[in-house]
Image: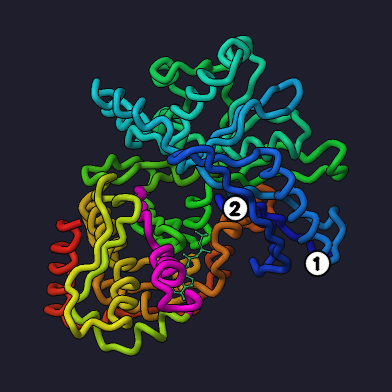
Amino acid sequence: MKEKYILSLDQGTTSSRAIIFNHKGNVCAIAQKEIRQIFPTPGWVEHNPVEIWSSQLSTASEAIATLGIHVDEIAGISIANQRETTIIWSRKTGKPIYNAIVWQDHRTAEFCDELRMVGYDKIVKQKTGLELDAYFSATKISWILDNVAGARQSAENGELAFGTVDSWLIWNLTDGTAHMTDVSNASRTMLFNIHSLEWDDELLTLFNIPRQLLPEVKPNSHVFAHTAGRLISSRIPICGVIGDQQAAMFGQLCIKKGMVKNTYGTGCFLMANTGEKPTISNNRLITTIAWKINNKVTYALEGSVFAGGSVIQWLRDQLNIIKSTKQVEALAAKVDDNGGVYFVPAFSGLGAPHWNQHAKGLIYGLTRGTKQAHIARAALESIAFQSYDVIKAMEKDIGSKVNYIRADGGASSNSTLMQFQADILRTIVERPQILETTALGAAYMAGLAIGYWENTDELIRQWTIDRTFIPLMHEDKVSDLIENWHTAVKKA
Ligand code: ADP
């Protein structure tokens, strides 16, 4: 029999990618296309939903052509997507009534402040596990209904559909016959009760959102629907759908309680598997659904660092002390340590566990002897220090020490950073060979649904380590570093 493949669509914030995996979980072809970032006014971020779809379709075709296979050789399609981004379209025409409002968009921040002021954040936290924030979909939906002429009435009449990016892609892949989402994406809307696993009437009333807008919610590893229509003539099952961070966690096979992954991308996204019961955080982390497979729900704690790898881009683009982000490692290696310099990259405030929108960035501890290399080193270390703060919050919530973390994302290729992370956390850091964990995690979901892969044991055997970083630094030195870091954070 001919080998079959899984086609994984990875619809991210900056680009759409299509990756084809084989049965060994290896990448066989990749295609990628950037998508336009639309900034209508400060604090607003939009994407064109039609471009999201067309870029995803063209990258899929390109990957299939690159590999030189026939569409029938695709056993299943998976979707991993940027989460929370909100799209509303007409059920009749399939046309969006407004641009996609991207997760980063803060236009509804004041509305969220008002709701928080009257104490609604407690209900939201208890039911959804989330902080009442403009980041999540609910207030973005209300905004569109209130600001697009006739939208609210059409929504009441059942003429409109809401979806996060996964739903939008499923709708288009099925030529408008399936309106669905999965539990991980639903759990980011601020409308989904993570305990009962249903859309929550009280929250729908609070945010003034008609239930008729909402998609059907499915488990992650499940045959959602089959591709259909003019553009895709073959009927291929869409059988794995999951939000990007949850996908990365599954791609890293963090499938046992207590396992933690950190994606070192533009920002850092940390997630801890907390098992079958939701752990509501006392340390300002988010509780979220990781996935649902075979009727079993797995929950996670999540914390995000806003400025991760972007600090290195800043060294390149604003300070001009490196030409490529890769060079930071060599520059930082010119000095033995940070020379007392600490860099708090609060370019857009500080994320978990500080959650301070007003914090401003600073470089602290400069002397006449400070060199470029010290600043490069401090920038690199800031990525690890910020991740350290999130892991410590996770440990408090979980009630035990995290013994190892699995790293992925662009900046995880930096071994100096990985070693420093292991040193200050006094924890093992594992870097896998395949860093495409987001697309892989979704592909795994799809493959498990159709028997392409038997079970998670088979997947665990595929996961291979590129390198393990073991803590080496002396304890006293670690304590000094952490103390100084926190002094700098306080000043920020
Ligand atoms: P995203 O998915 O968020 O776009 P990626 O996972 O592609 O991000 O990672 C890109 C980020 O990684 C950039 O911010 C870049 O500065 C950083 N990066 C890439 N290579 C290195 C390196 N060798 N050392 C440190 N940071 C790096």
Could you tell me how far apart the alpha carbons at marks 2 and 1 are, in whole angstroms? Answer: 20 Å
325 falls in the magenta region = yes
Position in image of residue 352 (x %, y %): 29, 50
Where does the C terminus fall, quadrant-wise? bottom left
| Quadrant including the N terminus | bottom right
| Mark 1 CB lies closer than 8 A to ligand 1 | no
Dot 2 corresponds to which residue?
442
| Mark 2 Cα-neighbour bin, 10 Å: few <14, some 14–19, many ≥20 | many
| Range of magenta residues | 301-326
**In percent of the image, x 51 and y 43: which residue is there?**
83
Residue at x 85%, y 62% (from the top left corner): 69
Q: Decide if residue 295 is in sight here.
A: no
Residue 196's spot in the image, x, y percent?
42, 28
- The residue lying at 15 percent from left, 56 percent from top is 490
Horizontal side, residue 191 vs residue 215: left or right: left
Counting residues from the N terminus, which is met first, the one under dot 2 or under dot 1? Answer: 1
